[in-house]
């Protein structure tokens, strides 16, 4: 029987975390960069604990105006400290509640840059590795990405990530949010994509071609229109297809 994790970016102020959390197995908690603060981190972690969901840090560029979805030209040392500080913020909030932090996933433009840019990927990995306690974190990153390679180079554990609510281009990158058809808000479409990745290890690109895609975790965005319905449909479809949904071990 196949197994896969289902993660979601939460604590970002979308307003329906409580509706999404019962369907996922990992929560990527916004930690003060693109969104979130001490109060929202605590609330999100408490919610995850109630549902037995693994807690992770979701660091992004410190740019709330653009929700971390616009690349910033940061000095590498400054970015290392920014990533490290955001992970520390989630760790401290989780420690006060008695919850472990199990994974880390970059957000938005930072995540997208690290897919192809070796320098940015190495900087993020250094930010994660900044604290020896982070050596146990699982790094979520796209298959075959620079981020995956950078994490492995520092002996960090990794989980290859696919997306259920985003369209893929033929080159394997996510379709830009500026273009039509970039987001799968239809629960049936997202559910079909989830099963295709989990069972068939492939995904249909925007141009109709199929791409090989080996994933250990699937993401659905907390701010996707109708996200709770998408989460419910994806979880049901995976389980109906015989896929065990669980956090990375």
Image: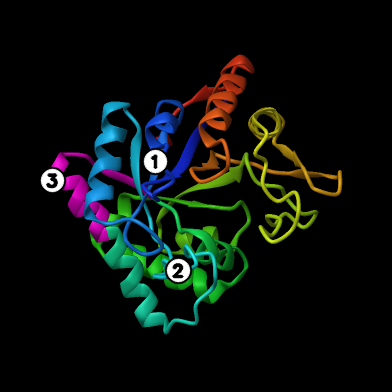
Judge whether residue 242 can be spotted in this image.
yes
Query: Which numbered dot is residue 65?
Result: 2
* Circle 2 Cα neighbour tier, 10 Å, few/some/many (<14 / 14–19 / ≥20): few
Mark 2 or mark 1: which is in front?
2
* Circle 1 Cα neighbour tier, 10 Å, few/some/many (<14 / 14–19 / ≥20): many
* Residue at (69% x, 57% y) in the render: 173
Q: Which type of secondary structure does the marked residue at label 3 adopt?
A: helix
Check disc 1 and report the residue beneath it: 27
Question: Which circle's residue, 2 or 3, is located before the other in the chain?
Answer: 2
Query: Which numbered dot is residue 96?
Result: 3
Q: Is residue 206 left or right of residue 3?
A: right
The CA distance from mark 2 to mark 3 is 29 Å
* Residue at (39% x, 49% y) in the render: 13
Query: In the figure, 205 relative to 117: above or below?
Result: above
Question: Which circle's residue, 3 or 1, is located before the other in the chain?
Answer: 1
Residue 89 inside the magenta-drawn segment: yes
Q: Which type of secondary structure does the marked residue at label 2 adopt?
A: loop
Rendering coords of residue 40 (x, y %):
28, 48
Residue 115 inside the magenta-drawn segment: no
The answer to whether mark 3 and mark 1 are in CB contact below 8 A is: no
What residue occupies the far left of the structure in this picture? Answer: 96
Quadrant (top left/top right/bottom left/bottom right) for the C terminus: top left
Observer-nearest of 194 and 11: 11
Query: In the figure, 235 relative to 92: above or below?
Result: above
What residue occupies the far bottom of the structure in this picture? Answer: 75
The answer to whether mark 2 and mark 1 are in CB contact below 8 A is: no
Q: Which type of secondary structure does the marked residue at label 1 adopt?
A: strand
Magenta stretch in the rendered image: 88-103
The CA distance from mark 3 to mark 1 is 17 Å
């Amino acid at each position: 029987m196949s197994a896969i994790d289902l993660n979601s970016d939460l604590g970002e102020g979308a307003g329906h975390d409580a509706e999404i959390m019962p369907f996922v197995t990992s929560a990527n908690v916004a930690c003060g960069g693109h969104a979130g603060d001490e109060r929202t981190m605590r609330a999100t972690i408490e919610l995850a604990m109630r549902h037995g969901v693994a807690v992770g840090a979701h660091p992004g560029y410190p740019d709330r105006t653009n929700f971390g979805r616009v690349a910033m030209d940061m000095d590498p040392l400054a970015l290392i400290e920014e990533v490290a500080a955001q992970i520390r913020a989630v760790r401290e909030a989780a420690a006060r509640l008695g919850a472990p932090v199990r994974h880390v996933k970059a957000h938005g433009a930072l995540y997208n840059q690290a897919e192809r840019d070796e320098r940015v990927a190495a900087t993020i990995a250094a930010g994660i590795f900044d604290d020896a306690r982070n050596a146990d974190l699982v790094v979520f990153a796209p298959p075959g990405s620079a981020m995956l390679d950078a994490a492995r180079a520092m002996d960090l554990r990794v989980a290859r990530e696919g997306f259920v609510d985003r369209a893929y281009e033929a080159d394997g990158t996510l379709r830009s949010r500026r273009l039509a058809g970039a987001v799968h808000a239809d629960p049936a479409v997202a559910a079909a994509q989830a099963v295709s990745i989990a069972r068939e290890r492939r995904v249909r690109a925007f141009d109709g071609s199929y791409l090989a895609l080996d994933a250990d975790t699937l993401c659905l965005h907390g701010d996707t229109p109708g996200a709770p319905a998408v989460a419910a449909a994806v979880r049901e479809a995976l389980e109906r297809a015989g896929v065990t949904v669980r956090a990375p071990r």
